[in-house]
Image (spheres, rainbow, N blue to C red):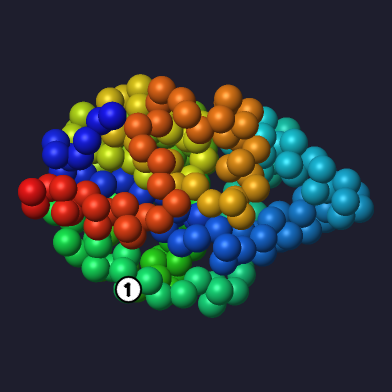
Amino acid sequence: MRGFSHVDTWVFDLDNTLYPASCRLFDQIDVKMGEFVSKLLNVEYAEAKLRQKQMFYKYGTTLRGLMTEHGIEPDAFLDYVHDIDHTPIPPNRLLDEALHALPGRKLIFTNGTVAHAERVLKRIGITHHFGDIFDIVHSDFIPKPELGPYQKFVKQTGIRPETSAMFEDIARNLEAPHALGMTTVLVVSPQNDDAEHLNKATGGTAQDHIHHITDDLAGFLQGIVGDRAL
């Protein structure tokens, strides 16, 4: 199992990674996506949800599916689906302390937007730890798990993949970082239905492209700090 003694850059996904899926924040986004698709395609909500999920699993994000199949402009969609209540996300003092003790550069790489990420980080109380947020706009609206966004992320941020670690809640989103040479960590949660589906679709969580699995991000980072101190 690969360790972390060589890592000097820490890359984190946002939703259901830096905060627990039990916050059900994505439930709000999920409803908003269904509403958007329903209005766009002029179909009932149940049919819209079915089509939305099909696009999510086929293209990696609903937005990419809507752009590819229906030619929508992304801004209206992103503004609509991220207009949600962020208060279910609680402050996380233990995560703040773990990030503070963890030496090296810390970055966000998300399929969401910078504005959404900033609101999430503020709620958790960890904004000050992160120097850059690489979002779906930076990746030209091409989502993870496509390799291209990761390559652009590496080029734009100047990180060295071989000394970087990537934390994600969806197993297939770690395939590209692993291929680039990054240490990979899957953050799991029983409430994360989409991640569970994708993990099963790729054969479960015990896969070669996943070096570590944790259901407690703060505790996991604290363990890394302790190991490095020894």
Element under disc 1: helix
Query: Which residue is drawn at the image coordinates 14% and 36% (left, top)?
Result: 6
Instruction: Please tell me whether residue 195 is drawn above or below residue 148 in the rendered image.
Output: below
Q: Is residue 184 visible?
A: yes
Q: Which residue is mark 1?
A: 93
Q: Nearer the viewer, residue 12 or 3?
A: 3
Q: Nearer the viewer, residue 14 or 151?
A: 14
- What's under tag 1, amino acid-wise? Arg
Looking at the image, residue 147 sits to the left or right of residue 5; the answer is right
Looking at the image, residue 15 sits to the left or right of residue 132; the answer is right
Residue 161, image x and y in percent?
24, 31
Looking at the image, residue 129 sits to the left or right of residue 76; the answer is left
Query: Which residue is drawn at the image coordinates 46% and 61% (left, top)?
Result: 19
Query: Which residue is drawn at the image coordinates 16% and 48% (left, top)?
Result: 227
Instruction: Please tell me whether residue 188 is drawn above or below residue 209 in the rendered image.
Output: below
Residue 7 occupies quadrant:
top left
Quadrant of the rendering where the N terminus is positioned = top left
Q: Is residue 156 visible?
A: no
Give the farthest residue toward the right. Answer: 44
Residue 189, image x and y in percent?
53, 51
Query: Which residue is drawn at the image coordinates 71% and 60% (left, top)?
Result: 32
Residue 76, image x and y in percent?
64, 57
Q: Nearer the viewer, residue 24 or 69?
A: 24
- Counting every numbered tag in the picture gives 1
Give the farthest residue toward the left. Answer: 230
User: Neighbour class for label 1 at 10 Å: few (<14), some, many (≥20)?
Assistant: few
Instruction: Please tell me whether residue 141 is drawn above or below residue 1 in the rendered image.
Output: below
Residue 88, image x and y in percent?
55, 74
